[in-house]
Amino acid sequence: MKRSQALAVGVALLLSGSVVAADAADNPAAPAAGHSAKRPSADATWCTEQGGSPQQQVPYYTKTGTQIVQLGGEREMCVFTGEDGTKITIGADTLAADKPTLAALAYIHKPADPGGHPGNPSIGYCESINGTAMYGPKATDGGGWAEKGETDASKVVAACMFGDGSVIDAWGLKYHTGGVIRGADLTKKFRADIP
């Protein structure tokens, strides 16, 4: 490419970027130069259609019960808030899965709680149905999911994760087994037909 052609291409690129930047200044919803507008995922859309609020959440480890440490990774969760202020959190991909998941089966079928769990009864129940909500080797180790940058350990939601990767709020699952609905009744909100 000749130098004059390269200069012309460079000026064209510079101007096109200026047009996008100018459009972004006139329209704050317009994407910035070099970026495309992020569309909600299909899982987030399903969550919203079911009355939930999609949130990007990250895992946290609770070191002392009050001190939390953000871990790597993130996951799209769907949070349902009831009129009474209670909440239930479920993986957006768990809610929107085309096939049944272990979390959905546990929620719908409500396996009996054998009881006798030392410590957190929601984690004990989760373990009794072959899930896990543990983040360390000691019974006092804890953790869960919350929005990025969270500093309040009480806002970290212990989630029961199953072998297929599906995840649901451990307390929401435990309460539902006893007939108590937290946040919303998920029974008819799963995309998959649950046998």
Image (cartoon, rainbow, N blue to C red):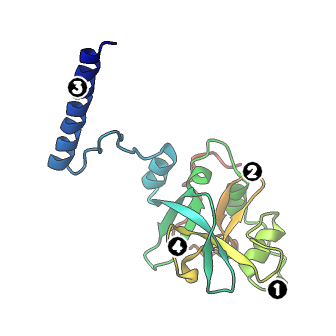
* Residue at the spot 62% in from the left edge and 87% down from the top edge: 66
**Which of the marked residues, 2 or 1, is nearer the chain's N terminus?**
1
Residue under circle 2?
164
Q: Which mark is residue 60?
A: none
Left or right placement of residue 62 versus residue 14 in this view? right
The quarter of the displayed image where residue 77 is located = bottom right
How many residues crowd mark 4 within 10 Å: few (<14), some (14–19), many (20+)? some
- SS at mark 4? strand
User: Marks 4 and 3, how far apart in space?
Assistant: 52 Å
Left or right placement of residue 25 versus residue 122 in this view? left
**Which of the marked residues, 2 or 4, is nearer the chain's N terminus?**
4
Measured as percent of width and height from the top left, residue 177 is found at 70, 72
**Which of the marked residues, 3 or 1, is nearer the chain's N terminus?**
3
Measured as percent of width and height from the top left, residue 10 is found at 27, 26
Query: What amino acid is found at the position of numbered circle 4 in the picture?
Result: Lys
Q: Nearer the viewer, mark 4 or mark 3?
A: 3
Residue under circle 1?
118
Could you tell me how many numbered marks the image carries?
4
- SS at mark 1? loop
Query: What amino acid is found at the position of numbered circle 3 in the picture?
Result: Ala
**Which of the marked residues, 3 or 2, is nearer the chain's N terminus?**
3
Residue under circle 4?
87
* Residue at the spot 54% in from the left edge and 78% down from the top edge: 155
How many residues crowd mark 2 within 10 Å: few (<14), some (14–19), many (20+)? few
